[in-house]
Amino acid sequence: MTHKPNAYPEPPSFNWDSNGVELRDVLPAYPPPEPIHRPELPSPTRKPSFSSTWSLSTHLIPACYLRTTRLTPEPKVPAPNIPKDERQRLLAKARLELDEMRTSKVTDGYPRVLWNCANRYVKKDLDAHNRTGLTLSFQHANGFPKEIFEPTLADLFASSAANIIDEVWLWESVQHGDAALVNAGSLSGLVDWHDNARDIANFLLHFMPTSATISPLPTHLPRVSPAETASRIKNGFSQRTFIAIGHSYGGCTSALAALIYPTLFSALYLIDPVILQYPSRPPAGLGNADLALGALGRRTTWPSRAAALALFQQSPFFATWDPRVLAAYVECGLCPDAAGGVRLKMSGVQEAIVFSECHTENEVFARLGTLDARVALRWVMPGRPGARELGAPGSVHTRVWVRRANATNVRIAGGGHLIPQEAPQELAQDLSEYLHSNFKSPRICGAPVPRANL
């Protein structure tokens, strides 16, 4: 299969600098000490919305025990039934409170165990004869559940790339989806994106099974041996070729995880990641403060899923979404509430808290040029006419070349920033072609990639 030409040709040589960005040390990634209470899954088991040749199971993983931020109360959000002007004033006050909390860089640990949630999709006929070791993990954008990627998976599994994929994981950060339900009452008003990167690394180092298997796995994945963890840090996976697929916030934190532990990663497939040069100049309405304010004022309850869907279908925000993605969002992003209706699994407050963190995106940009060249980079960028860039106008032309070696890029014609929501079929097609071009014969045991010192 021929390689697509890059949508953004490689520019003349240039040198990036950190522009004064503070490059912080990343805390180690390790799970909490035993014994710990192991919660139940908060949502009923379900079948995938696509081919029956893949089985689905859902799992809980203890998040990193030491958190980069301390446990603080969430800001209070005004009631929706107060006068509009007063509500806007109180929402702006809550957003400023988030900014003020971010000025403290002191952590005194975290007294509560948090959990990540992940869906596992494995080929039902997987055996020693067709096993390749190729493993994908999808990391979502802020505000969306892990299942937002299921329509992309449906199209990917319908392609010929399904023949070379053993297993897929859909990751969920601690504030999102089912993980948010498990962690109810334990989430902080202060979040650092470092911790999602560390949680991803914690899963890969300590809980990812050695190889894909059709055997059922327990809800709570057992921890691998210390010797296996040490081997992964030094040499990577012995029986897997691992590719991280991250969108927006998930792209930034996946890249940071690869910077910390490059041996674990064969490729990063970054879907318009929030990786921006400092100082970034986002268009009006796309800055962190604007997004946080919008999340704080977001409606979070509806009388029923049908009522929620009907309102979403009338909203300009959802108008460009693939109907399958919207259906997955209604099914898996909402849950029953105490009043007999439904609510968002992730609160608007927590979404705003995640948006208010605006440092890691600049750190990852400043560091990405040092990522080992053996970790392939694929930048998947918006191609819909009129789609706004995350950074300054025109910055994407050089952003996709911040790490030049072993890097490619593509534009998805049908998508703006929300490519998985708006163009899942086109996204799956590019991913399928990329996998065929680069991993048709995945390496099971590769040369070790040196670990970065951050």
Image (cartoon, grey):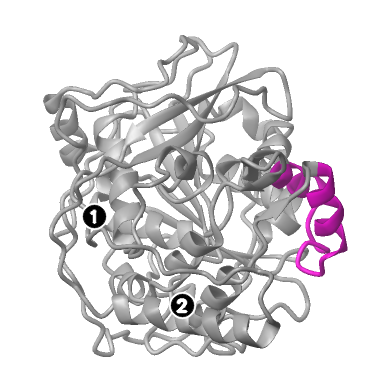
Percent x, y of residue 190: 33, 65
Percent x, y of residue 220: 36, 22
Up the image or down, 211 lies above or below 1; here it is above
Mark sitting on residue 94: 2
Percent x, y of residue 429: 71, 47
Q: Residue at x 36, y 39 (%)?
A: 115
Query: Residue 106 in magenta?
Result: no
Q: Amino acid at mark 2?
A: Ala
N-term-proximal mark, 2 vs 1 = 2
Crowding around mark 2 (Cα neighbors within 10 Å: few <14, some 14 to 19, many 20+) is: many
Q: Residue at x 84, y 43 (%)?
A: 306
Q: Is residue 402 left or right of residue 311?
A: left
Crowding around mark 1 (Cα neighbors within 10 Å: few <14, some 14 to 19, many 20+) is: many
**In which quadrant is the C terminus drawn?**
bottom left
Res. 9 in view:
no
Location of residue 202 by image quarter: top left
Which region of the structure is painted magenta? Answer: 306-330
Q: Amino acid at mark 1?
A: Ile
Q: Which residue is mark 1?
A: 260
Res. 148 in view:
yes
**Which element type, helix, strand or loop, lies under badge 1?**
helix
Whole-angstrom CA distance, mark 2 to mark 1, is 34 Å
Q: Nearer the viewer, residue 370 or 94?
A: 94
Magenta-drawn stretch, dominant element (helix, strand or loop)? helix
**In which quadrant is the N terminus drawn?**
top right
Q: Residue at x 48, y 40 (%)?
A: 181
Foreground mark, 2 or 1, reads 2
Q: Nearer the viewer, residue 155 or 82?
A: 82
Percent x, y of residue 216: 47, 11
